[in-house]
Amino acid sequence: MSDWQVERLRARAADLHARPWPAPLVPTVWICTPARPALVLGSAQPDDTVDRDALEALGADLVRRRSGGGAVWVEPAATLWIDVLVPRGDPRWDDDIGRAAHWLGAAWAAAVGDGAVVHRGPMVRPPLSARVCFAGRGPGEVSTGDRKVVGISQRRTRDGVRFQCVAYERWDPGPLARALRLTPTEAAEAAAAGAGTGPRLDEIEEALLQNIP
């Protein structure tokens, strides 16, 4: 990945999401470590169902990202959060939003291994996916079996695209369930939808950097 600029960033989740894009935009990878846990809502997701008292008890921030989808939980130690920025006109740019993340998903699948596959079909949107990212399946996202292991959202501008990717050492929707007031049925659905990678996030990070074209 000789043409990629790789930066390791540590800050509160709100500051990481608000970080300005490089100008001019060049192929960039941001490896993001949140300074404290955060519930990250999608751009169009209402926040009136968020339990602020639960968030405070969890020691977590409430953040809104500018890419779509349901909520994501991030925390310092057990979350692999990587943003990939690609300028328009780059060989990895694709005008087709439904196809744009396929190459990145393939790099993640190679890094995760264990039979991981890339979702190349249309969005799969069960009702809970509007609230919990890992309850649905989008183009380019990665699964093992029928459980999602890598979530990918994207924000597109006239300059390029920012793919925001998350994987977990252990998929635990408990904090999401508390913060979003999920019913027991919804919490069980969320638990069954995702999977963690096990204690090898550092290995996956390194492999991803090697596999990104």
Image (cartoon, rainbow, N blue to C red):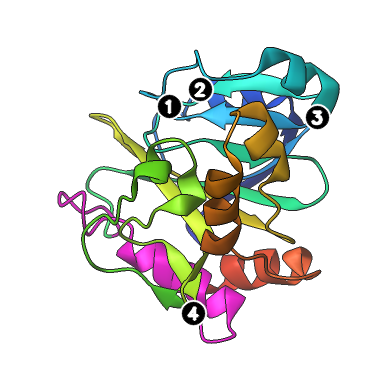
| Local SS, label 2 | loop
Give the CA distance from mark 1 to mark 3: 28 Å
Q: Residue 48, percent across and down? A: 50, 13
- Sequence-first tag of 1 and 3: 1
Task: Label 4, secondary structure: give it.
Answer: loop
The residue to which callout 1 is attached is 23
* Distance between mark 2 and mark 4 Cα atoms: 36 Å
Q: Real-space Cα distance between discs 3 and 4? A: 31 Å
Q: Which mark is residue 145?
A: 4
Mark 1 near mark 2, Cβ–Cβ under 8 Å?
A: yes
Which amino acid lies under the numbered mark 3 shown in the image of this protein?
Arg
* Residue 31 vs residue 89, the one in the foreground: 31
Mark 4 → mark 1, Cα distance in angstroms:
40 Å
Cβ–Cβ below 8 Å for labels 3 and 4?
A: no
| Dot 3: element | loop
Q: Residues within 10 Å of mark 1 (few under 14, many from 20)?
A: few
Lower sequence index among marks 4 and 1:
1
